[in-house]
Image (cartoon, rainbow, N blue to C red):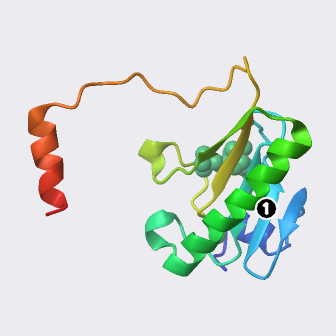
Amino acid sequence: METNCIFCKIANGEIPAATIYEDEEFRAILDLGPASKGHALILPKQHAANLFELPDETAGKAMILAKKLAGQLKDGLQADGINLVQNNGEAAGQTVFHFHMHLIPRYSGDTVNVTWKPGTLTEQDKKDIMKIFK
Ligand code: AMP
Ligand code: ZN
């Protein structure tokens, strides 16, 4: 556990939160500033600041848990869709530096904003990017 990490404290039960799921490795809670009704967060109990620090095994389990909880939220709240959002780094909108996955139920016509304005994939960008994966 990392001292001064609020999500370490919540995940490990030191600070109370509205828990919708708990096992040995994870706690899922309701977000205190929900984007929509049912907005939940999956927190690993072991501290990792972000995706880059997260052990592979935990990453895999987090996605399986996201699938399970997304289904329960969608059915239970009659949501029309669910966004999985996971921010890494301040530039990406991360404000709490303990890995977490957002589950955001979506309702037709809601005003939640997780969209962007599509740009254009240029030939130069494509070349630069493809190089990384060769
Ligand atoms: P992010 O911007 O991806 O780092 O998301 C952090 C999220 O944590 C935000 O949606 C906050 O509303 C939420 N949050 C911060 N503190 C708490 C807390 N004590 N309990 C529940 N959710 C929290
Ligand atoms: Zn932490």
- Residue at the location (66% across, 49% down)? 102
Image location (x, y in percent) of residue 129: 18, 49
The answer to whether the beta carbon of the residue marked 1 is less than 8 Å from any atom of ligand 1 is no
Quadrant in the rendering for residue 64: bottom right
Question: Front-most of 6 and 30?
Answer: 30
Does residue 27 sit above or below 102 in this rendering? below
Where does the C terminus fall, quadrant-wise?
Answer: bottom left
Does residue 58 sit above or below 65 in this rendering? below
| Residue type marked 1 | Ala
Residue 51 is left or right of residue 72, and the answer is: left
Instruction: Answer yes or no: is residue 121 visible.
Output: yes
Where does the N terminus fall, quadrant-wise?
Answer: bottom right
Does residue 119 sit above or below 30 in this rendering? above
Q: Look at mark 1 in the image and give the residue it sits on.
A: 28
Image location (x, y in percent) of residue 70: 74, 51
Image location (x, y in percent) of residue 47: 61, 75
- Residue at the location (88% across, 61% down)? 19
Residue 22 is left or right of residue 57, and the answer is: right
Q: Say what secondary structure mark 1 lies in.
A: strand
Count the marks: how many? 1
Q: Residue furthest top?
A: 109
Determine crowd level at label 1: few under 14, some 14-19, many 20+ residues with C-alpha closer than 10 A.
Answer: many
Instruction: Answer yes or no: is residue 15 visible.
Output: no
Image location (x, y in percent) of residue 33: 77, 39
- Residue at the location (12% across, 47% down)? 128
Does residue 83 sit above or below 41 in this rendering? above
- Residue at the location (81% across, 77% down)? 23
Question: Front-most of 121 and 54?
Answer: 121
Residue 97 is left or right of residue 126, and the answer is: right
